[in-house]
Image: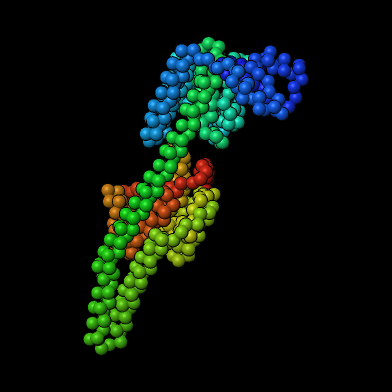
Amino acid sequence: VAISKSRLPDVPVIVCSGVARESDVEASLAAGASDFVLKDHLWQLVAALRRAPRAQLDHEQLVRQNAAAVKLVAVVQELSLARDLGAIIEIVRVAARQLTGADGATFVLRDGDLSYYVDEDAIAPLWKGRRFPLHTCISGWVMINGRSVIISDIYADPRIPADAYRPTFVKSLAMVPVRQPAPLAAIGNYWRDHHECTPEQLMVLESLANSTAVAIEAVRIRDDLEHRVQMRTRELQTLNDELEAFVSAVSHDLRAPLRAMRSEIDVMSELNTAAALEANLSRLREQEQRLSTLITELMRLSQISRAELVIERVDLSAVARSVLARLQAAHPDRSARVHIDDGILIDADVGFLAVALENLLDNAWKYTANCAPAVIRVTAHLTAAGDREIRIVDNGVGFDERFAHRLFKPFQRLHSQAEFPGTGIGLATVQRIITRHGGRVWARSSPGQGSSFCFTIPQPGRAEPAEGGSSA
């Protein structure tokens, strides 16, 4: 009874009990109960309710509650229109203070094991932009336990890090979690004088927190849908580009070897020596091989666009060594200095990643054919955004970087077929593989200065790049 009256002094309390000792009845009435009813005589409850004094609210209190309700409705409407987390935080950090008449308000995000005081609205600076371990601050306690808290004297509560509060104006506070269970944020109110947050103030603050949780979830769902639409749009655009490239290939690239084969056949029909016939057959086989390779590469590109990815941990260093060992064995006369960073681990589809590396390293090997020695490096670096960037660098002929965008389009080549034979599909295949993984690929170069092909694939965890490396 005493607790109920201290929290809600204007609300009448009727005690219902299975026991009616005289001492219990007297104690209940002395604590503020308006009546006492036995459980076996619940029919008396109606009369007790009629006898109970009406809860009285003074005019000023009614005005405050009505103003808070009107403001809360307006805030909920604003939150329903918010399109990103920044807009939500801006609305909440102002509303949290206005709704309760507090001297300060803060919005705290859960950032892993840290409380991030992302924004505030207060009469003096608090902790905007700072992070604290969850177990060392009251916002962390609220998010860990999923419970609201009212503290009228911050220096009397062991959950408060007093040293962090001494430079501030704060004497009392209330903090509520955003979302239950598994809170993702907290909203705090602060007072410069000793203040007992009222049940009405706490209720308004909790209502704001509930509306905030709904708004954040709506933003997350909208962002997810927009991301899916963007991904699908990019996939459709890629498929459309590939279709256009295939039409171009059929009209030009695939017709070229067919025309050459037809010409050779016409010549063969007029030849009358075995040596001449053998030479023409050799050229015919070369054209047939070129045509077969083009078809195989087109089929591979088509499969990459349709096949489902199977993501697993891949030792990219080992895959790169295997590809370069094959190239070295196929060209024992070549002199090459190869460096591969140790321990480059990536979560990806191992089959597709091997195809991408094979195309990139085949190119590096091909375009360093005239270098003595050729230098090829495979390294991993950590970007400013925390992603793992893989670089395949060579000292080959290079290219004009102004035309780098053409490299990743099917059948677009920057060097002549006679100088450096190829299908023009390899780098388009690389881009499709990396894009399917949600990453990106690009190239840097200058004529005669070698080339650097780079790609990133988003990873579920952040890891430091490997130190050192190995040579072959």
Residue 253 location, x and y as percent? 27, 67
How many marks can you see? 0
Q: Is residue 395 visible?
A: no
Is residue 176 shown above or below 197?
below
State the colouring used for the structure image.
Answer: rainbow
Is residue 152 shown above or below 420?
above
Outermost top residue: 193
Quadrant in which residue 410 is drawn: bottom left
Is residue 308 shown above or below 393?
below
Q: Is residue 433 left or right of residue 40?
A: left
**Image quadrant containing the N terminus:** top right
Outermost bottom residue: 272
Residue at x 73%, y 27% (from the top left corner): 18
Residue 355 location, x and y as percent? 44, 60
In the foreground, 219 or 22 = 22
Residue at x 36%, y 54% (from the top left corner): 235
Q: Is residue 90 left or right of residue 45?
A: left
Residue at x 39%, y 34% (from the top left corner): 80
Q: Is residue 236 visible?
A: yes
Residue 332 location, x and y as percent? 46, 65
Residue at x 27%, y 48% (from the top left corner): 402
Is residue 264 shown above or below 55?
below
Quadrant in which residue 278 is drawn: bottom left
Quadrant in which residue 47 is drawn: top right
In the foreground, 409 or 13 = 13
Residue 472 location, x and y as percent? 51, 55
